[in-house]
């Protein structure tokens, strides 16, 4: 099958045996070899079917090109590979075989440059161009140089950086009751092990690797996080452990928007961090309100951690995050890390000596406003039609019976309505044939009214 190789929001993904094959992986790895030129390359893989085999294939290809390759000796989270890429001497970059939170039949490859964050659009475009320009066999760059492949366990270095960043003594002094739902993901053997290293008790579920992820999506969302108890905080991660999920002591899922607001206040006031709050356009206004009250300036980026990572590298950053469950801090890597996120939440609860549900109530009280969110997805396979609708909306003066007071075109188009509480983001999905309408306002009645308006508006346009 002749698949057009195009990098999406975070790497190249496809169904095993269809879009994702030895042929496509060989083309991608050859192009990355030509892009990099020389140096050491780190390679890792998550628990998905054949991820380890593709990782070994990539390692051998790169060694044939003369690269020294360090291949993970076991399943590993994406952030571990990103940290290793940033801290390894003479590292050219890293490859991670994962499809993140996609269904089990998918596999993917992420390219992580040596700055330890997602590849920018400029980098992936250059790799795509190399692939497109090569209609012949790739030639070895330096025929006299022999590469090598060695296997290594990266976990100890990762544990040590986390122990520098997280106050485990505070957690040990005042530990909450913890449930860790491994969700059959790459976080198993890492989140649990660092808790054990620091003598922190916890209950554990789904603690094995399963390429089918128990028959569910490997996503730390409430419908997949089934193991919870009154009085316990439940933590989970997605398939490659770069996203987090948390359920409070009352059994309620805490949205990433609220987590970002809580952590921003904690990092600024308790840990005395200084710098910007960096967030994607999809993140709740709650974070903007909290940032303003803390006198923290906000940088807004398009959707995708590659944009957050780039902003982090250019600006002193307190916290960077997205509403899909990815975050990092300015003193760490410019890549999202779900294990670090869960540990940071754990530290906050212990250090402030308050249950998570109370901290949620307090941040909403601090903000002085409560927002509600929802999304309307419109099935559209025609990219031109999506662009037509977005362009039409750009020129509107009113939307959902309100005046549009401001527009942003950072990613799609974002409308700010006259009530100063309602924002609507319209953008194309980066992974599915959908046009998405993200709605945020301050009441359920407004939310429902806007949803009905969108459905009627799209019906007319389609």
Image (cartoon, rainbow, N blue to C red):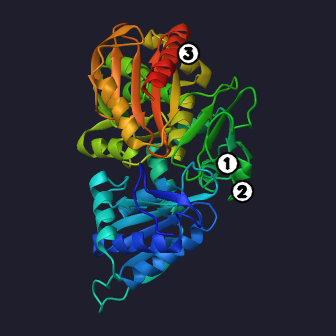
Q: How many marks?
A: 3
The relative height of residue 30 versus residue 411 in the rendered view (above or below) is below
- Residue at left offset 62%, top offset 36%: 221
Task: Classify 417 as above or below 373.
Answer: above
In the drawing, does residue 311 fall left or right of residue 96? left
Does the image show residue 91?
Answer: no
Residue with the mark numbered 2: 208
Image coordinates of residue 450 in percent, x first then y, are: 48, 14
Q: Earlier in the sequence, mark 3 or mark 1?
A: 1
Q: Which residue is mark 3?
A: 361
Q: Secondary structure at mark 3?
A: helix
Residue 2 spot, x, y in % from top left: 46, 69
Q: Secondary structure at mark 1?
A: loop
- Callout 1 touching callout 2 (CB < 8 Å): yes
Among the 4 quarters of the image, the one containing residue 419: top left
Label 1 to label 2, Cα distance in Å?
A: 8 Å
Q: Nearer the viewer, residue 346 or 457?
A: 457
Q: Is residue 220 above or below residue 73?
A: above
Seen at 31% across and 84% down, the residue is: 139
Q: Of callouts 2 and 3, which one flags the residue occurring earlier in the amino acid sequence?
A: 2
**Residue 182: assigned label:** 1
Q: Nearer the viewer, residue 210 or 363?
A: 210
Mark 1 nearby-residue class (10 Å; few <14, some 14–19, many ≥20):
many
**In the depicted view, which residue is nearer to us: 290 or 31?**
31
First-in-chain label (1 vs 2): 1
């Amino acid at each position: 099958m002749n698949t057009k190789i195009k990098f999406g929001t975070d790497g190249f993904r496809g169904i095993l045996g269809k879009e994702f094959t030895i042929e496509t992986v060989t083309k991608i790895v050859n192009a990355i070899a030509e892009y990099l030129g020389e140096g050491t390359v780190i390679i890792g893989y998550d628990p998905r079917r054949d991820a380890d085999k593709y990782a070994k294939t990539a390692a051998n290809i790169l060694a044939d090109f003369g690269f020294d390759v360090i291949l993970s000796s076991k399943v590993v989270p994406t952030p571990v590979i990103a940290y290793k890429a940033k801290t390894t001497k003479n590292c050219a970059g890293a490859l991670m075989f994962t499809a993140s939170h996609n269904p089990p039949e998918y596999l993917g490859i992420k390219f992580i440059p040596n700055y330890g964050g997602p590849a920018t659009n400029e980098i992936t475009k250059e790799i795509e161009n190399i692939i497109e320009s090569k209609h012949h066999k790739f030639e070895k760059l330096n025929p006299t140089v022999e590469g090598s492949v060695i296997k290594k366990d990266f976990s100890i270095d990762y544990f040590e950086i986390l122990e520098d960043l997280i106050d485990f003594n505070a957690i040990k002094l005042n530990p909450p009751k913890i449930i860790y739902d491994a969700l059959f993901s790459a976080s198993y053997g890492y989140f649990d092990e660092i808790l054990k290293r620091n003598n922190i008790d916890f209950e554990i579920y789904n603690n094995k690797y399963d390429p089918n992820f128990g028959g569910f999506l490997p996503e730390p969302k409430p419908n997949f996080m089934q193991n919870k108890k009154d009085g316990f905080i439940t933590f989970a991660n997605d398939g490659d452990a770069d996203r987090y999920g948390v359920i409070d002591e009352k059994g309620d899922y805490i949205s990433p928007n609220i987590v970002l607001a809580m952590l921003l206040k904690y990092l600024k006031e308790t840990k005395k961090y200084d710098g910007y709050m960096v967030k994607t356009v999809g993140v709740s206004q709650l974070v903007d309100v909290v940032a303003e009250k803390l006198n923290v300036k906000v940088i807004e980026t398009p959707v995708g951690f590659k944009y957050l990572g780039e902003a982090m590298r250019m600006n002193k950053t307190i916290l960077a995050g997205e509403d899909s469950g990815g975050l990092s801090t300015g003193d760490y890597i410019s890549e999202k890390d779900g294990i670090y996120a869960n540990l940071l939440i754990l530290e906050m609860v212990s250090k402030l000596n308050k249950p998570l549900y109370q901290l949620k109530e307090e941040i909403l009280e601090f903000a002085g406003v409560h927002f509600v969110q929802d999304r309307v997805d419109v099935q559209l396979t025609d990219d031109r039609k999506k662009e037509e609708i977005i362009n039409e909306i750009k020129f509107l003066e009113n939307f959902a019976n309100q005046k549009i007071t401001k527009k942003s075109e950072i990613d799609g188009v974002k409308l700010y309505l006259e009530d100063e509480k309602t924002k609507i983001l319209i953008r194309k999905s980066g992974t599915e044939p959908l046009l998405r309408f993200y709605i945020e306002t301050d009441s359920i009645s407004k939310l429902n009214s806007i949803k009905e308006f969108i459905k009627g508006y799209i019906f007319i346009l389609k």
